[in-house]
Amino acid sequence: MQYVISILGILVVLFLAWLASSNRKKVKVKPIITMLIIQIILSVFLLNTEFGLILITAISNVFNKLLEYASEGISFVFGGMANEGEAPFFLTVLLPIIFISVLIGILQHLRILPLLMKGIGWLLSKVNGMGILESYNAVASLMVGQSEVFITLKKQLGLLSKQRLYTLCASAMSTVSISIVGAYMTMLEPKYVVTALALNLFGGFIIASIINPYEVQPNEDMLEIQEFRRQSFFEMLGEYILDGFKVAIIVGAMLIGFIALMAGINHVFELIFHISFQQILGYLFAPIALIMGIPLSEAVSAGGIMATKLVTNEFVAMLDLSGGNHDFSTRTIGILSVFLVSFANFSSIGIITGAVKSLNEEQGNVVASFGLKLLYGATLASILSGIIVSLVL
């Protein structure tokens, strides 16, 4: 029965994407089937094999070691602020982002990161039936972030069609930046975080190729990546340190605002309707939880967490999942964890629109015009990843 529900869930997600398609006759079926098979194989490999366990353990150990290094700097500056045995979220989860940002800067400065992004992007383009530029953008979004990636495409933004621009933005919203993966791993099991990174890469292409099908001509697919201004090593370090700090502060500020707002709204709803706002959202999202393979007894609570992620951001939802009073099964935790690892929320519409608009105002207005459709597609990609995982758990 579990497999029947999961397969039915995949069909429902593909149908929902097809309903929003701009050109249903141009949807390419073969690449979609190929990428679905790749997603299933990756899920089995990462979650159900010894080699997958070894790989995830190795990745987890790397991030744990990086977090240890980060804690050295944090302890020097903020040592003594926390009581013994306590682990304040800002110190243990957000501030390590600074150190990860520095490492990304070093890899960028040494030209290792651009080489990886171009190489993996070229390989992906052979599978997804899209252009090299779209594939590069998906990998670059994963490595440098959903807003920073557009800087590398500055020269090409003004030349892109609305269809290609949608796919680039959808990739940026469906993935997450490596700079905050370490933060996710402090709240979720690393195996689910790593699995989600791999699945979302293909899930974003699957949904985008249905919602937004188009053909890329060879002469339109030149991959000319904007080179960053050459900096000295220490100038680069200073820039990435400050960038990492800005991300930590912005995420912290958003968490304070969103969590406080959610608490206030819940209290008002409980006073008036004797039910919290999150519970109402839970009932609305329960059908989605069901098609993801989550049992009926857990669907409402799971739907509430899914809705929280959409309305606020993934950090708020992850905190709810890891620290809330939920009696979820191990399988449900795995499905929800994979669903939460993406930037598919309302605030991301503003972030991506702002990033593009700062580089090309006209194209930024185009992105704003399909913002809700962008969120719809990225959310479907997250749901699809959760369903794929439900097949193998």
Image (tube, rainbow, N blue to C red):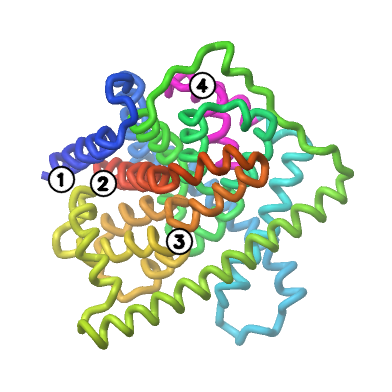
Residue drawn at the location 27% of the way across and 78% of the way down: 276
Q: Are marks 2 and 1 in contact (CB under 8 Å)?
A: yes
- Measured Cα–Cα span from mark 3 to mark 1: 29 Å
- Give the residue number, with chain letter if any, for mark 4: 131
Looking at the image, tell me whether mark 3 or mark 2 is earlier in sequence order.
3
Residue 258 image position (x, y, % from top left): 46, 71
Amino acid on which disc 2 is placed = Ser
- Give the residue number, with chain letter if any, for mark 2: 390
Query: Can see residue 53?
Result: no
Residue span colored magenta: 116-143
- Measured Cα–Cα span from mark 3 to mark 2: 23 Å
Element type where label 1 sits in the image: helix
In this rendering, position of residue 335 left or right of residue 178? left
Amino acid on which disc 4 is placed = Gly
Q: Which mark is residue 2?
A: 1
Residue 75 lies, with reference to residue 177, above or below; the image says: below
Does residue 274 belong to the magenta stretch?
no
Q: Are marks 3 and 2 in contact (CB under 8 Å)?
A: no
**Depth check, front residue: 123 or 162:** 162
Query: Can see residue 234?
Result: yes
**Depth check, front residue: 204 or 66:** 204
Looking at the image, tell me whether mark 3 or mark 1 is earlier in sequence order.
1
Q: Nearer the viewer, mark 3 or mark 1?
A: 3
Looking at the image, tell me whether mark 4 or mark 1 is earlier in sequence order.
1
In this rendering, position of residue 147 left or right of residue 168? right
Element type where label 4 sits in the image: loop
Q: Nearer the viewer, mark 3 or mark 2?
A: 3
Q: Are marks 3 and 1 in contact (CB under 8 Å)?
A: no
Residue 358 image position (x, y, % from top left): 66, 46
